[in-house]
Image (spheres, helix red, strand yellow):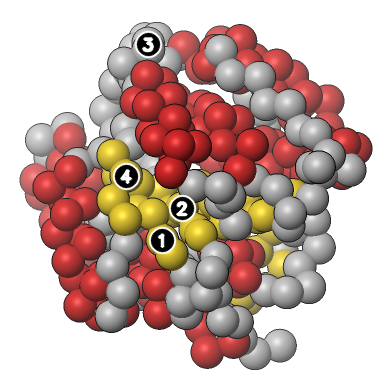
Amino acid sequence: MTWSTADIPDLTGKTALVTGATSGLGYETALELLRHGADVLIAARNPQKASQAAETLTAKAGKPPTVLELDLADLASVEQAANEVLKQYDAVDVLINNAGVMAPPYRQTVDGFELQLGTNHLGHFALTGRLLPLLRHGSRVVTVSSFMHKTVRGISRQDLRQPAAGYRKWESYGKSKLANLLFMLELDRRARAAGAQLLSVGAHPGYASTHLQAAGPELAGRDLQARLWRAGTRLLAQSAAAGAWPSLYAATYPDLRPGSYVGPGFFEYRGTPKVVLPSRTAQDPELAKRLWEWSVEATGVDPVLTVPN
């Protein structure tokens, strides 16, 4: 199968929200959605970077996005951003849960959760749950994971509040990406059980050249390591634009089945997107159900899917 952004259908009249859209995969995803006519909200933590990204997106796409301030590491910010969207929009046709942090030194979110699980999973869980009233009539939720989810064998409630002692940054990152897929598949199961017109799917970029790889070393003050990451990524990885293809495919391909997971076609490393398989652990419905319950407990958000009127 061949696919490119030229195959994206006309999205005029559709509203899309992309988290983490100031650079990298999120920026490239927002750019193509704008180019194909969608009204796009770019949700980001840094207002200055969001404003700069909006300017360049407008220049390239010929259509301005709407900036939404959102800090996924702060559940109060998630609630405020969701309320803003609920006030201003009647529907969100595509929600792309893209933003994330990768392998930083130990940090906690505002609410005391380990930063990677708190941001990559809990923030998106809460955002999706709060936006459910607008996710109807065929809306899609695309949750962006990573092939790093295959490096871990499970997740526990205690991982959400992992203390500094025993913290392993890559293991925590893998668990956050496993959580993304467990959530995506459980959302799909619950949507189908409720008869809700909501398509929950996942995507991963393979190895894409973004700032994400160097961000962790930068936070730790390891400038040489950050430079090496940047150099290696430029040499070996595909572009951020190509890395965004699986997300765009998942968001727009007409006949995608519920619960599909999309990644690059060449050994899930790079190339044309195709449907790929999550790990067995990610497909465990009992673990997904437990994670859902832990996430409700952690965020105070209890997503309930209903059949639209």
Task: State which tag comes first along the sequence, 3 or 1.
Answer: 1
Q: Residue at x 24, y 72 (%)?
A: 58
To which residue does mark 2 refer?
Answer: 17
| CB contact under 8 Å: marks 3 and 1 | no
Quarter holding the C terminus is top right
Please tell me which residue lies in front, 245 or 65.
Answer: 65
Task: State which tag comes first along the sequence, 2 or 3.
Answer: 2
Q: CA distance from mark 3 to mark 1?
A: 31 Å
To which residue does mark 4 refer?
Answer: 68
Please tell me which residue lies in front, 48 or 283.
Answer: 48
Task: State which tag comes first along the sequence, 3 or 4.
Answer: 4
Rendered image: mark on residue 40: 1
| CB contact under 8 Å: marks 1 and 4 | no
| CB contact under 8 Å: marks 4 and 2 | yes
To which residue does mark 3 refer?
Answer: 112
Location of residue 59 in the rendering, given as x and y in whole percent from the top left corner: 20, 78
Describe residue 29's horizontal placement relative to residue 278 as left or right.
Answer: left
Describe residue 114's horizontal placement relative to residue 55 as left or right.
Answer: right
Disc nearest the viewer among 3 and 4:
4
Task: State which tag comes first along the sequence, 1 or 2.
Answer: 2
Q: CA distance from mark 1 to mark 2?
A: 6 Å
Location of residue 95 in the rendering, given as x and y in whole percent from the top left corner: 54, 51
